[in-house]
Image: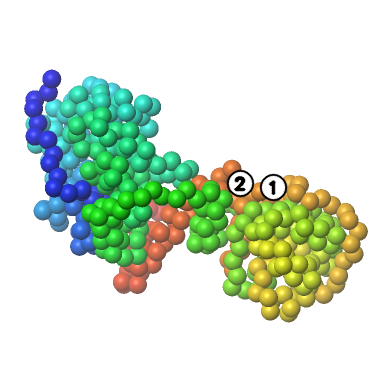
Amino acid sequence: MHASRKPLRMKRPVLQVALDITELPRALAIAEESVAGGADWIEAGTPLIKSEGILAVRALHEKFPDRTIIADMKVADTGTLEVEMAAKAGASIVGILADADDAVVEEAVRAARLYGVQIMADLINAKDPVARAGEIERLGVDIIAAHTGIDQQMKGMGSLDLVRSLAGTVSVPIAVAGGIDTGSAGEAVRAGAAIVIVGGNIVRSRDVTASTKAIRQAIDRPKAGKAVQVPVDEQIREILMKVSAPNVTDAMHRKGAMEGIVSICGDVKIAGKATTVQTFAGDWAKPVEAIDVAQPGDILVINNDGGTHVAPWGELATLSCVKRGIAGVVIDGAVRDVDDIRKMKYPLFAKATCPNAGEPKGFGEINAEIRCCGQYVRPGDWIIGDESGVVVIPKERAYEIARRALEVRKNEERIREEIRRGSTLSKVADLIRWEKR
């Protein structure tokens, strides 16, 4: 048995802000804004510690001596050494991996008692988290964190069900982390969380103070009720309409963008599933027939075999799409009747314009895999298009990529705000530091 410890007592749910960024000056500024918004605890996130070292913990402690500082070390070995480092730098709580060997957990706990700090054990990736929570509580940890990692969140996994499973099975406080926002923060408290850990939805916000206040309010006055389950396709479409085509290519590691294609009607946007069409040299039979095959909200993606001397698409086909509720059209080829189509402000993307009409010969296929503007497209793949271009998202990863693109957008919003305040992109990104040597 370990020496007795004084259990944590909290008058109200704690809001912990996780600084999961890599630049210390930015982290300190964001921490200051979050404290102004009501953050109780400030976490030096694992990316920050890996980037800046244990000095990041010391800097946070010196700047916020009245706040609890957490060092999210994710200790997996050398429990005594890493806890000692964090404690001497000013951390009040040190994060370890719950799945670390028992010997590591025991050493971390012993060191914590010696240096007067607390241990938070992170259940991320634990195979049997409820069983492991009971084991590490007996080993002496002070807080158990129900945590879904960022990559898992992108695939739709969450932490609230784990909090519910843990509630009542352990006596130490439960922390929750992983995609928490104003909508889920109150639900987390109702589920049994005493500590609500928020990262991206605060630190990547344009207005960190306002976002912190909103989550603080949701925690302090959680509303009863159950969240409505929205079908996945609706979630994907809703997210894609919030982000840009560049956001999506960034989320896909600069992949998926079609080549040589532009928006015919300027400032329009599309997001939907692909109905694919293969045709040849202006044969407009299959493209027009596909209008009747596609479902409302779908996007026609047409390969005209790259020819731009004759158009397989025009104003009458566009009008048919409008009446059928087809969300947009993408053509590896030319279009005509552009003046009429622009009056409709219809989302039409093509390689060129050409007044020559083709003939309805009936060659080709509908809903077969095609190659369009350099990208392979299958029926059901997701398409997003705006003035920057068109991107193809593999259907198997559509939800994940949409979520990642949303994180890209949030990060850009924060950077944009810092530039407005007088910084520059080079300074915010710390380009010189990260250049390859």
**Image point 59% across, 43% down: which residue?**
396
**CA gap, disc 1 and disc 2:** 8 Å
Taking depth in this image into account, of 393 and 90 the one nearest to the observer is: 393
Residue 395, disc: 2
The amino acid beneath tag 1 is: Arg
From what the image shows, is residue 346 above or below residue 240? below
Q: Secondary structure at mark 2?
A: helix
**Image point 21% across, 27% down: which residue?**
137
Residue 271, x across and y down, in percent:
59, 59
From what the image shows, is residue 7 above or below residue 127? below
Residue 258 visible in this rendered orientation of the protein:
no
Taking depth in this image into account, of 354 and 369 the one nearest to the observer is: 369
Q: Secondary structure at mark 1?
A: loop
Q: Which residue is mark 1?
A: 378
- Judged from this view, the residue extending furthest toward the top is 1
The amino acid beneath tag 2 is: Lys
Q: In the figure, is residue 417 to the left or right of 266?
A: left
Give residue 97's quadrant in the image: top left
Residue 297, x across and y down, in percent:
64, 59
